[in-house]
Amino acid sequence: MRLRALLVVALAALGLVVVMSPAEPAWACSCALSTTERDERADSIVVGTVSAVTDRGVRITVDSVEKGGAGVGDTLGLKVSRSEESCGYGFRVGARYRVNSSAGATGLCAGIREISAPALAATPSATPSAASAERTQVAGRHVPGLWWIVGGATVAVLAAGLVVAARRRAGGGHP
């Protein structure tokens, strides 16, 4: 009887912990390469203005070429997801970007940086945007909120109380 009661208490506590645990964000993208490594792996690196964005890709009018066979004035069609959580990128029509691509595709981890005309002349190989870098750093880190700590402590106290009550009923416990 005592073993059965302890099993029920343990299962109830486990169930409460699972129900109360905070949901982790789902990040399918993890960028581990440095800017230099991204540039080395890219087939093409261009600076250009986005002329169209679809669910499957982006069209960029090339302003300058750092690497690859594209020419100034060419329009590149690159495959890219719009979701940064799945390594895509949220391009904006009319904005200028420095874009790395390989095999006709690009994404957050390939190396994309939104730029302005003065930034292009000053730092053509600068690092990815602060938002992208922060998203990459935050992806693997989770800090539980205060409610999670209080909830876990509550479950532990309830489980301990149930164990003590089960022992007293069975006559095996002392106050």
Image: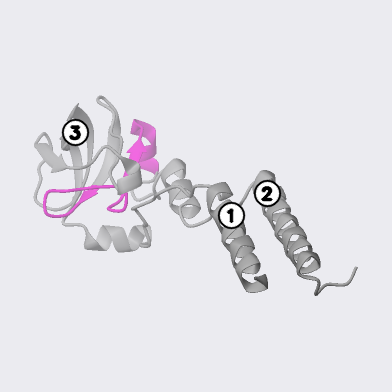
Which residue, given by chain and number where applicable, does mark 3 sit on? 55
Which residue, given by chain and number where applicable, does mark 2 sit on? 151
Dot 1 lies on which element?
A: helix
Going by the numbered disc 2, the residue's amino acid type is Gly
Label 3–label 1 contact, CB within 8 A = no
59 with respect to 40 (left or right): left
Marks 3/2: CA–CA distance: 41 Å
Range drawn in magenta: 100-122
Residue drawn 20% across the image and 42% down it: 80
Pointer 3: residues within 10 angstroms few (<14), some, or many (20+)? Answer: few
Q: Is residue 35 above or below residue 112?
A: below
Front label number (3 vs 1): 1
Pointer 2: residues within 10 angstroms few (<14), some, or many (20+)? Answer: some
Going by the numbered disc 3, the residue's amino acid type is Asp
Image spot of residue 109 (x, y percent): 31, 53
8 with respect to 101 (left or right): right
Marks 3/1: CA–CA distance: 39 Å
Nearest to the observer: residue 152 or residue 105: 152
Front label number (3 vs 2): 2
Image spot of residue 78 (x, y percent): 14, 42
Nearest to the observer: residue 59 or residue 167: 167
Q: Residue furthest top?
A: 94
Image spot of residue 122 (x, y percent): 39, 42
Marks 1/2: CA–CA distance: 8 Å
Going by the numbered disc 1, the residue's amino acid type is Val
